Amino acid sequence: MRTRGISRVALVTFLSLAPLFSQTVLDDLRSRYAHEPDPVRKAKLLPRLGDAEFAGIQKQIDGGNMDDALTAVREYRDQAQSCLTALDAKESDPEKHSSGYKQLQISLRESIRRIDFIMANLTGDDQEPFRILRNDLEQLDQHVIKELFPRQPANQSGTGKPKN
């Protein structure tokens, strides 16, 4: 009987502290990202940081706090942009030395998917700022793909469709 009481207390304590742990993890990842001088290691941190940030963003949306959620998505976009800028400055041939670019691309794709999910549950007016941020992330993603795969055949027809 006593064991059950202790386990219930432990469970209640854990559940009440779980949000603090997730915020602590997010704060730790943000700090590590901000203080990391190497762009490749920064890019490798970005998928985990994005996971933690979007978990927080979803909680903010669920709580009706759209302004803070948008601020967090903007912060993620800015982190991804600065990471890409640093990778571009460091690496002259991303096709051969793709470390960092791959992780950034994975994080961008996942974030775009998450924003699509968020927008599906919002009204039209609430969707618009998220759509703008999604487009920014899509442009970053396209840039990364062009860096990773620069030798893609050019579309010669000008119609948007590949020639047969």
Image: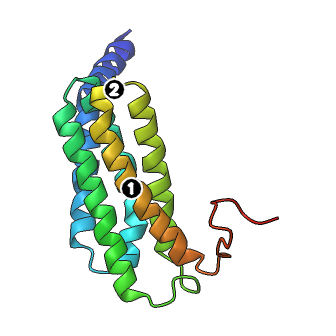
Spatial distance from mark 2 to mark 1, Cα to Cα?
20 Å
Q: Which mark is residue 124?
A: 2
The residue indicated by pointer 1 is 137
Residue 14 can be seen in this image: no
Which sits in the foreground, 94 or 34? 94
Which quarter of the rendered picture does the N terminus lie within? top left
Specify the farthest residue to the bottom.
92
Q: Which class describes the residues within 10 Å of circle 2: few (<14), some (14-19), or many (20+)? A: few
Q: Does residue 105 appear to the left or right of 12 in the view shown?
A: right
Say what amino acid the circle numbered 2 marks: Gly
Say what amino acid the circle numbered 1 marks: Leu
Residue 52 lies, with reference to residue 142, above or below; the image says: above
Which sits in the foreground, 151 or 108? 151
Residue 76 lies, with reference to residue 43, above or below; the image says: above
Residue 47 lies, in percent from the top left, at 43, 57
Give the residue displayed 34% in from the left and 63% down from the top.
Answer: 80
Residue 95 lies, with reference to residue 45, above or below; the image says: below
